[in-house]
Image: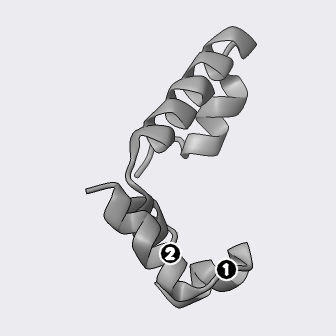
């Protein structure tokens, strides 16, 4: 893929203001995702997420159901 740059390279070449704007937009997009979608994007099960958060799996399930 001659002439193509990876995302990290492109970010490093951007003006700081543009990079900050893109990073803010990405954070906002992530905040708008539902908990279950975020968990799945990270490749975690409810049990794994619960362990990371120090809560029970059933609590993760309840939180995800609140998003519906």
Q: Residue 47: which quarter of the image?
A: bottom right
Residue 9 lies, in percent from the top left, at 65, 39
Q: Element at badge 1?
A: loop
List the residue tagged with mark 1.
55
Residue at x 41% of width, y 39% of height: 32
Structural crowding at the residue carrying mark 1, measured as other residues with C-alpha within 10 Å and reported as few (<14), some (14–19) or many (≥20)? few
Residue 61 lies, in percent from the top left, at 42, 77
List the residue tagged with mark 2.
60
Q: Residue 38: which quarter of the image?
A: bottom left
Instruction: Give the colouring mode of the picture.
Output: one colour
Q: Are marks 2 and 1 in contact (CB under 8 Å)?
A: yes
Q: Element at badge 2?
A: helix
The answer to whether residue 20 is visible is yes
Residue at x 74% of width, y 15% of height: 16
Between marks 2 and 1, how big is the CA–CA gap?
8 Å
Q: Nearer the viewer, residue 64 or 27?
A: 64
The answer to whether residue 45 is visible is no
Quadrant of the drawing holding the C terminus: bottom left
Q: Count how many numbered circles sit on residues in the image.
A: 2
Name above or below for residue 37 compared with residue 56. above
Residue at x 53% of width, y 41% of height: 5
Residue at x 69% of width, y 10% of height: 17
Structural crowding at the residue carrying mark 2, measured as other residues with C-alpha within 10 Å and reported as few (<14), some (14–19) or many (≥20)? many
Residue 11 lies, in percent from the top left, at 64, 31
Residue 55 lies, in percent from the top left, at 67, 80
Q: Residue 64: which quarter of the image?
A: bottom left
Query: Which of marks 1 and 2 precedes in the sequence?
Result: 1
């Amino acid at each position: 893929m001659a002439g193509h740059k990876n995302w990290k390279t492109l970010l490093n070449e951007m003006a700081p203001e543009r990079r900050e704007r893109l990073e803010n937009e990405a954070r906002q997009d992530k905040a708008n995702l539902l908990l279950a979608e975020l968990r799945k994007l990270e490749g975690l099960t409810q049990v794994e997420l619960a362990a990371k958060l120090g809560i029970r799996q059933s609590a993760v399930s309840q939180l995800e159901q609140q998003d519906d």
